[in-house]
Image (cartoon, rainbow, N blue to C red):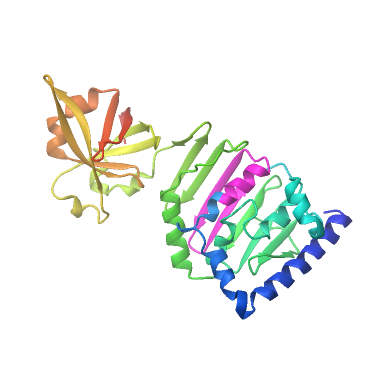
């Protein structure tokens, strides 16, 4: 930061501290809880981190979830700017407001960002030109040193779980399992999620395509050898596993499946082959009886069509190699 930005940062810290102090008053105390708990879904701040990275002209972004913290990093080439807090309204309208200003404001550009404070009391940010943390939802505080985990061309966000770590970990895991970015991105080409022994990548274009198979350890060990790698295209593109099994499914998983079917033509008639789908894990279970009965069609087809009970259709292209 140059001297002007340092002066703006000090003024911004003073301004946000005054607001945070005001939020402690009885008449407006509930607004803080509303700001933090605004998203209906948990951990929606992850999408605002991605939007911020895109605004910083990053091409690659990655989340790393550990038991006691979440790391987010990207290779954005833009620096964190700070503008005069006295001119924030006009700067916002003119689209020249500083990124530090925006991250420390309620719902400006990043409407779900404050939900990160469900999991931490202070979000730490390390960039090439500035290192700071955000306390009390909106108060920026300069940090004395850089993080040893940051590469020279990276921006690093660290969310330490100092509020119910186990709950934080589980809720963010769930958000990653349901990950689906809906807004347009201008710069980001790849998004990577590393969690629960899995490393999943997404290619960003007109749509976001999931690449890379899920961790095969999500499949019970006794079933892995017979599992078949498949690639899905459609509303939830990506790579899946088709897993034959014998006996009762509850012997292999305690999760609740979504009943779906794969159509197969026998003679002139269409037969529906039932499967138990776990879309969040990218796994389809099929009974060994049905797999053997329709094995030729399932293995010979270049494309497998998967239908939900409600009639939704997705297409699977089978990878020739077994897991």
Report the side of 167 relative to 59 (left or right): left
Q: Is residue 61 magenta?
A: yes
- In the rendered view of the protein, which quadrant contains the N terminus? bottom right
Residue 218 in view of the camera: yes
Of 310 and 317, nearer the camera is 310
Image position of 313 with respect to 124: above or below: above
Of 47 and 167, nearer the camera is 47
Give the tally of numbered discs.
0
Residue furthest right in the image: 3
Report the side of 278 relative to 68 (left or right): left
Q: Quadrant of residue 259?
A: top left
The x and y percentages for residue 30 are 56, 73
The x and y percentages for residue 292 are 14, 33
- In the rendered view of the protein, which quadrant contains the C terminus? top left
The x and y percentages for residue 179 are 45, 47
Q: Is residue 77 magenta?
A: no
Residue furthest top in the image: 268
Residue furthest front in the image: 27
Where are the magenta residues, as a range? Answer: 48-74
| Residue at 49%, 47% in the rendered image | 193
The x and y percentages for residue 211 are 45, 36
Residue 129 in view of the camera: no
| Residue at 48%, 70% in the rendered image | 164
| Residue at 73%, 43% in the rendered image | 78
Of 259 and 232, nearer the camera is 259
Image position of 216 with respect to 186: above or below: below
Report the side of 69 relative to 22 (left or right): left
Q: Quadrant of residue 254?
A: bottom left
């Amino acid at each position: 930061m140059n001297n002007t930005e340092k002066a703006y940062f000090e003024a911004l810290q003073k301004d946000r501290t005054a607001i945070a102090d005001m939020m402690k008053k009885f008449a407006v105390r509930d607004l803080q809880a509303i700001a933090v708990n605004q998203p209906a879904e948990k951990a929606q701040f992850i999408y605002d981190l991605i939007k911020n990275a895109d605004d910083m002209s990053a091409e690659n972004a990655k989340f790393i979830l550990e038991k006691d913290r979440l790391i987010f990093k990207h290779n954005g080439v833009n620096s964190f700017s700070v503008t005069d807090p006295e001119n924030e309204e006009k700067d916002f309208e003119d689209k020249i407001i500083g990124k530090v200003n925006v991250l420390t404001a309620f719902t400006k550009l990043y409407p779900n960002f404050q939900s990160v404070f469900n999991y931490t009391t202070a979000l730490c940010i390390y960039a090439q030109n500035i290192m700071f943390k955000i306390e009390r939802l909106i108060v920026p505080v300069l940090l004395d040193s850089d993080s040893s985990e940051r590469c020279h061309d990276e921006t690093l966000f660290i969310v330490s779980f100092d509020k119910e770590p186990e709950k934080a970990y589980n809720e963010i895991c769930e958000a990653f399992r349901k990950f689906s970015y809906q807004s347009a991105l201008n710069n980001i080409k790849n998004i990577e999620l590393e969690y629960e022994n899995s490393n999943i990548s997404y290619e960003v274009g007109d749509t976001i395509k999931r690449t890379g198979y899920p961790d095969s350890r999500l499949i019970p060990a006794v079933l892995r050898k017979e599992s078949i790698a498949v690639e899905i295209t459609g509303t939830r593109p990506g790579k899946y596993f088709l897993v034959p099994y014998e006996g009762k499914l509850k012997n292999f998983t305690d999760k609740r499946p979504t009943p779906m079917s794969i159509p197969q033509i026998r003679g002139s008639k269409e037969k529906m082959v039932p499967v138990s789908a776990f879309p969040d894990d990218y796994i389809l279970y099929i009974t060994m009886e049905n797999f053997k009965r329709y094995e030729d069609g399932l293995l010979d087809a270049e494309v497998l069509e998967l239908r939900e009970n409600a009639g939704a259709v997705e297409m699977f292209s089978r990878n020739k190699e077994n897991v």
